[in-house]
Image: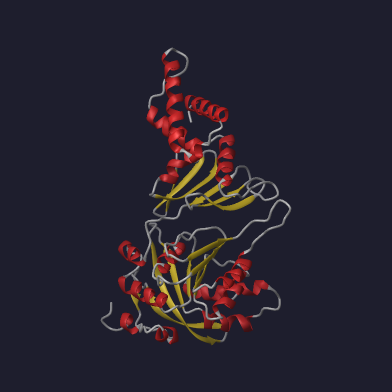
Amino acid sequence: MTEAVREITEQVRLRVRREGVDLAADRGLAEQYVRDELRRYSERALGGHGSLIRDEHQAAREIVASLTGFGPLQPLLDDPEIEEIWINGPDRVFVARDGVSELTSMTFTEQEMRDLVERMLQASGRRVDLSSPFVDATLPDGSRLHVFIPDITKHNVAVNIRKFTRRIRDLNQLVELGSLTPQASEFLRMCVLAGQNILVSGATQTGKTTLLNALLSATRARDRIVTVEETFELDLTARDVVAMQCRQPSLEGTGEITLRRLIKEALRMRPDRLIVGEVREAESLDLLIALNSGLPGMCSIHANSARDALAKLSTLPLLAGRNIDSAFVLPTVAGCIDLVVHCELDRQGFRRVSEIIAPSGQLSGSLIEASPIFLSPDGRLTATGGYPTKLAKFRAAGLDPAIVLGPGAA
């Protein structure tokens, strides 16, 4: 931001305070105020009092963004090609396009960084300070914000903004992008209609949330869907959706709402399908108990493979307390989880489904038996010829996976 732009921005802010208006609620008024102050500044500059602005249109956009949006970051947030933004310091601003990161030429002052973080958190109602030095929040456009401050970080405030694409709404779009084959897409659609419990796994940034959204687009129109997340990330278009997120404790340490509490409360809301955005800790136990009651559900989990995801889901519930042991957890996971869909991000930034397996419901020692339904031996998702062995839900829904998986169905 040049000195001229800073001066005009400050003049607009003075006028806003003087007249008591809210520019964030009226972008048209903000643009009018900026045009007025730009004209006054240009008149003074022509008289020799200040430097001329070369591109007044660009300056106006920059000033409006700083007043109504998130300043220099707003163009990055508006760019549909950018999927993630992170700031390691005032002169270390990175973006990711198609899974590939790049360093931008953008720079901030320390004060601009602090002001920017404050504005971003203001919309969410969450806070970051010495007593709570990191925070997860949701921006007005649905992007996820994560902030760390010193002394958790070594020198500077660290900011990460994960944008969630609205371009991908259903499984057909994933097929068009090449992330999923038509045969796998039809199989997954059938599994959703049959009320299968689906676990979506993968590393960070592999498209787990996008796949969950696409899977949920295949639900029946009359289904009531209840989603539970740490911060809002899922973006569903179904007609009957209740979305809930966790809440941080207050300054007094009260009022915290955890993921475990939300899962329990969700069961009282007559869901036809329970969705947990991601399980990381003891909330996995509450999810398994819910699924074990016959309620269809989906969730995501960080894992290196589909089988690793099953192993991890069999371990996380042990964090719930010493009275929980594997003798309960292992058969519950084997019996509850009907399908594991694994996502990958390759070195070129391409996201795809790389593996789909179906647990049989049986244990082999401490391992959950599972049949591979689709694998990617040569980089392309291919049916193995295997079939799910748990067929009761398919039969109850009047569906037959052999129609999709049988010979000649590809």
Quick check: 270 above or below 330? above
Where residue 59 appears, x then y in whole percent? Answer: 42, 30
Q: Answer yes or no: is residue 304 visible.
A: no
Residue at coordinates 46% horizontally, 66% vertically from top-left? 240
Where residue 385 appears, x then y in whole percent? Answer: 34, 83
Answer with left or right where residue 264 lies relative to residue 236.
right
Nearest to the observer: residue 225 or residue 47: 225
User: Where, by quadrant of the figure, is residue 405 drawn?
Assistant: bottom left
Quick check: 199 above or below 292? above
Where residue 225 appears, x then y in whole percent? Answer: 48, 69
Disc tally is 0
Residue at the far top: name it. Answer: 47
Quarter of the image where the C terminus is located: bottom left
Answer with left or right where residue 24 lies relative to residue 255.
left
Residue at coordinates 58% horizontally, 38% vertically from top-left? 115
Quick check: 169 above or below 409? above
Nearest to the observer: residue 4 or residue 242: 242
Answer with left or right where residue 151 lies relative to residue 271.
right
Nearest to the observer: residue 256 or residue 277: 256
Residue at the far right: name it. Answer: 252
Q: Answer yes or no: is residue 249 visible.
A: yes
Where residue 144 appears, x then y in whole percent? Answer: 52, 53
User: Where, by quadrant of the figure, is residue 188 drawn?
Assistant: bottom left
Nearest to the observer: residue 41 or residue 321: 41
The color scheme shown is secondary structure
